C-alpha cells in the first residue's frame, strides 16, 4: 500500500444545511478507497452529523476526526465575524467543542450565526487544534491589505491561546486572491515559527456536483441560480480531491500536506 500523503481536515456535509451536500457514508467510503488514514467532518458551527460520521468512518477503517467550522466574534465589528476551524484532538477537546457551540447558539447569535467569543477560548482550549481559516479567517484581510504587523499580532495571540496547536491554514481551491494569500500566509508562519498546513474545503463529493451544490446554496440564500449578480462564495474545485490530486496541487510544498497527516495523528477520540 502506498504511503499516505494527505488527509482531508475540512469537509462540510449535508448537515451543514446551507452549504454542503456531501453524504457522510459516501465520503467515508471515498476516503477508505483512496487510502486516507483519517478524515475530518467539520460542519458549519454544528456537530449534528458526528454520530453517523464516527460510525461510518470506523466501519471503513478510517480514523474519524470530529471538528467544526466555527464563527469567531469580531470584537471590533460584530457584524464581521471570522472563521476558525476547531478539531477535537481528545475526548476533552470534543467536550470543550460541544460546550463552545452550545454556549454560542444559546447566548451569542448574530444574524443566524452562533458566534464563539475569543475570551471563551482563552479561558480553556485544551484538547483542541485550531486552523486559521484561510480566506474566511481573521488573517485574510490584514494579509491581503499589506497590514503585516496586524496579521502578526493576530497570529501570535491565537498561538498563545492554542500553544503548539495552532496552524496557519492554506488552500488552492480557486478562490480570488488565493495564491497571494497563500504566499503571505506561509511567509507569516515562517516569521513567527508557526506550522502551516494545506487543507481543501470540501463541499461536495464530485466535480460534477458543483451545480447541485450551487442550487442548495441559492435555496438557503433565497437567491436565483441564474442571477449573475449574486455573490459566489464557492468554486468548482471544492470537491473531494484524492491524495494524488492534492500531491500535484502542492508539489511545490509537500510539507504542507505532511502536516495534515501530523494533525490526523494528533486527533484521537
Image (cartoon, grey):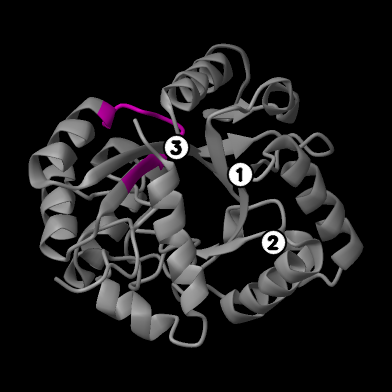
Specify the label residue 251 is tagged with. Answer: none
**Residue closest to the far top:** 106
Q: Tell me the residue that label 2 is attached to.
A: 140
The outermost residue toward the right is: 149
Q: Is residue 233 visible?
A: no
Asked if the residue at tag 1 contacts the one at tag 2, i.e. Cβ–Cβ closer than 8 Å, the answer is: no
Where is 113 relative to 193, above or below? above
Name the residue: 72% across, 57% down.
139
**Where is mark 3, residue-wise?**
68
Could you tell me residue 126's position as x and y percent? 60, 27
Considering depth in this image, is 224 or 144 the residue closer to the camera?
A: 144
- Badge 1 marks a residue whose secondary structure is loop
- Taking the image as shown, residue 95 lies to the left or right of residue 8, namely right
> Closer to us: mark 2 or mark 1?
1
Q: Position of residue 249 (x, y in %)?
A: 40, 82
Callout 2: SS: helix
Residue 194 forms part of the magenta stretch: no
Q: Residue at x 19, y 74 (%)?
A: 2
Q: Does 49 lie within the magenta span?
A: yes
- Which mark lies nearer to you, 1 or 3? 1
Q: Which mark is residue 165?
A: 1
Residue at (13%, 46%) from the top-left corner? 61
Q: Which residues are magenta?
A: 40-50
Q: Quadrant of the C terminus?
A: top left
Q: Earlier in the sequence, mark 2 or mark 1?
A: 2
* Residue 184 vs residue 194, the one in the foreground: 194
- Neighbour class for label 3 at 10 Å: few (<14), some, many (≥20)? many
Q: CA distance from mark 2 to mark 1?
A: 19 Å
What is the C-alpha distance between the residues marked 3 and 2?
Answer: 19 Å
Amino acid at each position: 500500500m502506498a504511503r499516505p500523503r494527505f488527509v482531508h481536515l475540512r469537509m462540510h456535509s449535508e448537515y451543514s444545511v446551507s452549504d454542503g451536500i456531501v453524504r457522510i457514508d459516501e465520503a467515508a467510503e471515498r476516503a477508505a478507497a483512496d487510502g486516507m488514514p483519517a478524515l475530518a467532518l467539520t460542519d458549519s458551527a454544528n456537530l449534528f452529523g458526528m454520530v453517523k460520521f464516527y460510525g461510518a468512518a470506523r466501519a471503513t477503517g478510517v480514523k474519524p476526526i470530529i471538528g467544526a467550522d466555527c464563527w469567531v466574534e469580531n470584537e471590533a465589528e460584530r457584524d464581521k465575524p471570522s472563521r476558525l476551524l476547531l478539531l477535537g484532538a481528545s475526548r476533552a477537546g470534543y467536550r470543550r467543542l460541544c460546550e463552545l457551540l452550545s454556549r454560542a447558539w444559546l447566548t451569542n447569535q448574530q444574524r443566524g450565526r452562533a458566534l464563539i467569543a475569543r475570551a471563551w477560548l482563552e479561558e480553556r482550549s485544551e484538547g483542541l487544534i485550531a486552523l486559521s481559516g484561510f480566506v474566511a479567517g481573521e488573517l485574510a484581510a490584514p494579509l491581503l491589505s499589506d497590514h503585516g504587523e496586524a496579521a502578526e499580532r493576530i497570529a501570535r495571540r491565537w498561538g498563545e491561546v492554542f500553544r503548539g496547536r495552532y496552524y496557519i491554514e492554506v488552500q488552492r481551491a480557486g478562490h480570488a486572491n488565493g495564491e497571494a494569500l497563500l504566499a503571505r500566509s506561509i511567509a507569516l508562519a515562517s516569521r513567527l515559527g508557526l506550522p502551516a498546513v494545506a487543507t481543501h474545503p470540501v463541499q461536495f463529493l464530485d466535480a460534477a456536483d458543483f451545480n447541485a451544490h450551487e442550487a442548495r446554496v441559492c435555496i438557503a440564500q433565497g437567491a436565483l441560480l441564474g442571477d449573475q449578480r449574486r455573490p459566489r462564495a464557492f468554486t468548482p474545485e471544492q470537491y473531494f480531491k484524492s491524495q494524488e490530486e492534492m500531491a500535484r496541487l502542492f508539489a511545490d510544498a509537500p510539507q504542507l500536506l505532511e502536516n495534515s497527516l501530523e494533525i490526523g495523528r494528533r486527533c484521537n477520540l
